[in-house]
């Protein structure tokens, strides 16, 4: 749900910590973070993250004042390489307190992918979970300036990377600096996304833009937020997707900004629908975030199989993948007056449109959402409907970390409006409703993860027995879209091709199916004929 509070002249001048610390003063004993048997109050979370911030202050410069290009971070970077555990969110807050820019690390990456990310971000500190030490150790061999390492212990038995600092010891032994850093709304958060380039890109969000933008928090006055927080003890929010993705992270921040509690699933490794359903019941969760049918269908099956269902669920928020009418109906049939919201947006644009069950005509465009005609460059909206690239104005990121070219191509002024123009194609009608037409052909959104087709093709074509390959997505009832590969080979088995991709790339990038064809049909310029390819792949569910 979205926190909407009264207006005041303080709009847009503060960051997350100014808001949350003020709330902690009035609801200090309330649960702030819950997972399994661990319950951490607002006051405890504030104190632990303060200690982490003190330690980070001693190991970073924090913020560098002066002018910076939109593709530059004014703050030192701190990476967070942790599963859905309280330490993930604590590390983000600790980074803010040291005036550093936290960023997410995809824990599914293999060593080569992780090494690229670390070189691109150049973090001063990396907070990592113990189980990832073997992959991290291999990746660091390819990084010329390794970060200071902080290890979050778990029961994996993995040997921490040499020289790592223990996370709990860091917090226990941290000493307040002579002069504490004072965070600002101009400090940045960096959200790494797979994007449309194949390699991860860091999207630079100023906190004062992220608060009303992707977090959807209309906080005009800290005083008003504090005033309302004691009345929102009912708000207990569970982000089911990985916190390393924007959907779950911004959702958790929204709940905190109303004085709510963030509840994490008991199992941080696997999404277990039955376990999540039990957590929703046990913890009296009122608000749930999911990624389309990938999460909705197993959850609904778990609810249906149980005689002891959650009783407090009021809101279901979905983003990042298709949410079918079947799932929508499932929630309303089981929970009556539950409000289900399907959101359209991206790391680069923030929220662009929402769809509730009554919106049968498509997504309802946000006040700053429009479509840019690809040929004329003109803006299309309710007053001038048409097709084109989906764009958003209002509160936007600064740019892409270290990528001036991409920054200039996405964030530009059109018709006197400063917009973020995504690679998503859409149509807007005269009522302001958005019909999403799809992403660029080479990007596959599968279960909320973005897969760059050419990256998978490159892994496949490393095999000597493969003459040609083309990777694309096809509709899937479970994943929204699934990765499939058209291959030209007489000798390779599916297992061999699957292993070749899995050796180099994260598991979600491995094709679900390998379809053999005599040749890949291409145009004279060498580009694939995607119409033919989609016909070969088939359009049925699997």
Image (cartoon, grey):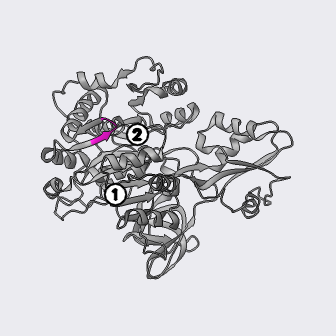
**Main SS of residues in magenta:** strand
10 Å neighbourhood of mark 2: few (<14), some, or many (≥20)?
many
User: What is the secondary structure assignment of the residue under circle 2?
Assistant: loop
Q: Is residue 168 visible?
A: yes
Q: Which residue is mark 2?
A: 84
Q: Position of residue 283 (x, y in %)?
A: 31, 46
On residue 313, which mark appears? 1
On residue 339, which mark appears? none
Q: Is residue 64 visible?
A: no
In this picture, which residue range is highlighted in magenta?
33-37
Q: Please state if 115 lies on the left or on the right of 181 as rendered.
A: right
Q: Position of residue 223 (x, y in %)?
A: 13, 55
Total labels: the figure holds: 2
Magenta-drawn stretch contains 329: no
User: What is the secondary structure assignment of the residue under circle 1?
Assistant: loop
Residue at 23% from the left image edge and 43% from the top image edge = 31
Q: Position of residue 368 (x, y in %)?
A: 38, 69
């Amino acid at each position: 749900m979205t926190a909407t509070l009264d207006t005041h002249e303080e709009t847009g001048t503060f960051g997350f910590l100014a808001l949350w610390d003020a709330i902690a003063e009035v609801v200090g004993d309330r649960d702030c973070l819950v997972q399994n048997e661990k319950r951490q109050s607002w006051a405890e979370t504030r104190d632990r993250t303060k200690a982490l911030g003190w330690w980070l202050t001693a190991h970073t410069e924090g913020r560098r004042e002066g002018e910076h290009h939109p593709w530059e971070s004014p703050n030192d970077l701190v990476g967070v390489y942790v599963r859905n555990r309280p330490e993930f969110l604590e590390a983000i807050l600790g980074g803010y307190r040291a005036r550093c820019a936290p960023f997410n690390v995809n824990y599914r990456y293999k060593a080569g992918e992780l090494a690229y990310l670390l070189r691109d971000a150049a973090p001063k500190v990396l907070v990592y979970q113990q189980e990832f030490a073997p992959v991290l150790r291999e990746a660091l061999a390819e990084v010329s300036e390794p970060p200071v390492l902080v290890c979050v212990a778990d029961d994996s038995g993995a040997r921490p990377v040499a020289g790592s600092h223990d996370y709990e010891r860091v917090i226990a032994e941290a000493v307040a600096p002579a002069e504490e850093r004072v965070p600002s709304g101009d400090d940045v958060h960096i959200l790494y996304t797979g994007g449309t380039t194949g390699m991860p890109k860091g999207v630079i969000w100023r906190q004062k833009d992220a608060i009303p933008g992707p977090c959807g928090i209309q906080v005009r006055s800290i005083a008003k937020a504090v005033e309302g927080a004691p009345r929102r003890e009912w708000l207990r929010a569970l982000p089911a997707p990985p916190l390393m993705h924007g959907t779950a992270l911004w959702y958790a921040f929204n709940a905190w900004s109303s004085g709510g509690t963030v509840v994490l699933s008991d199992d941080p490794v696997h999404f277990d629908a039955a376990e999540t359903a039990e957590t929703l019941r046990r913890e009296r969760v009122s608000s749930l975030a999911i990624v389309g049918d990938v999460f909705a269908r197993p959850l609904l099956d778990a609810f249906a199989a149980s005689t002891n269902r959650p009783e407090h669920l009021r809101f279901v928020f979905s983003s990042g993948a298709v949410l079918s009418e079947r799932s929508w109906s499932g929630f309303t049939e089981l929970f009556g007056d539950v409000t289900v919201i399907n959101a359209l947006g991206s790391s680069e644009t923030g929220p662009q449109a929402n769809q509730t069950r009554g919106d049968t005509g498509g997504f309802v465009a946000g006040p700053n959402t429009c479509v840019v005609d690809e040929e004329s460059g003109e803006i299309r909206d309710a007053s001038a409907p048409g097709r084109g690239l989906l764009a958003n104005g209002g509160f936007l990121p600064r740019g892409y970390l270290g990528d001036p070219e991409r920054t200039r191509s996405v964030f530009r002024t059109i018709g006197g409006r400063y917009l973020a123009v995504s690679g998503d194609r859409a149509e807007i009608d005269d009522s302001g409703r958005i019909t999403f037409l799809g992403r660029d052909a080479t990007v596959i959104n599968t279960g909320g993860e973005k897969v760059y087709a050419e990256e998978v093709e490159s892994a496949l074509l490393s095999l000597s027995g493969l003459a040609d390959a083309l990777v694309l997505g096809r509709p899937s009832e479970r994943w929204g879209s699934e990765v499939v590969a058209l291959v030209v080979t007489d000798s390779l088995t599916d297992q061999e091709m699957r292993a070749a991709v899995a050796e180099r790339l994260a598991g979600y990038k491995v094709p679900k199916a390998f379809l053999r064809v005599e040749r890949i049909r291409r145009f004279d310029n060498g580009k694939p004929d995607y119409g033919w390819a989609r016909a070969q792949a088939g359009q049925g569910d699997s």
